Amino acid sequence: MGKVKKINGRFMHMVFFWLKDTTNPDEFIKITQTFVEQIDEVNSFHIGKPAGTPREVVDNSYQISLVVTFDSKEEQDVYQDHPVHVQYVVDNKDKWEKVQIYDSWGEIYA
């Protein structure tokens, strides 16, 4: 089997943002990246826009996605209460219409 790589981190926090019309998506991405990079508990992250894959089962209606990985649920809990994360939500909640979050915990499979 080729060079398939596992995602770093066993806990995945996936956030999907539907932005207000007045919000610049590129500026929102920069703000989001700046906040995530300040939190030591973050293992890895990805910020993106919909890939435009037109399949019936794919939701392309959001504007920005944020996927953050952690080594444990406890590290994700620290992230949720981290002052930088709390301030990010306070400062930016007026920039989105809707936020949808999915959290996933993965065991290490051999």
Image (cartoon, grey):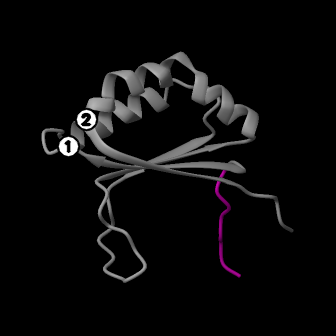
Position of the N terminus by quadrant: bottom right
Q: Where's residue 54, x and y in %?
A: 31, 80
What residue range appears in magenta?
1-8
Residue at the farthest left position: 22
Q: Is residue 2 magenta?
A: yes
Residue at the farthest top position: 83
Estimate the spatial distance between the alpha carbons at disc 1 and disc 2, rounded to whole Å. 6 Å
Secondary structure character of the magenta stretch overall: loop
Label 2 Cα neighbours within 10 Å, binned few <14 / some 14-19 / many ≥20: some
Q: Which mark is residue 95?
A: 2
Query: Which amino acid type corresponds to the residue marked 1 in the rendered image?
Result: Lys
Marked residue nearer the N-terminal end (1 or 2): 1
Q: Tell me where residue 88 sits by quadrant.
A: top left
Say whether residue 100 is left or right of residue 26. Answer: right
Q: Work out whether residue 57 or residue 97 is closer to the camera in this orientation and state it.
A: 97
Query: Which amino acid type corresponds to the residue marked 2 in the rendered image?
Result: Lys
Say whether residue 2 is left or right of residue 107. Answer: left
Position of the C terminus by quadrant: bottom right
Q: Work out whether residue 93 or residue 48 is closer to the camera in this orientation and state it.
A: 93
Against 100, is 43 above or below?
Answer: above
What's the residue at 68%, 61% (across, down)? 6
Say whether residue 81 is left or right of residue 109. Answer: left
Q: Is residue 20 magenta?
A: no
What's the residue at 43%, 79% (across, down)? 57
Provide the residue designation for mark 1: 20
Would you say the residues marked 1 and 2 are in contact, meaning their CB atoms lie under 8 Å apart? yes
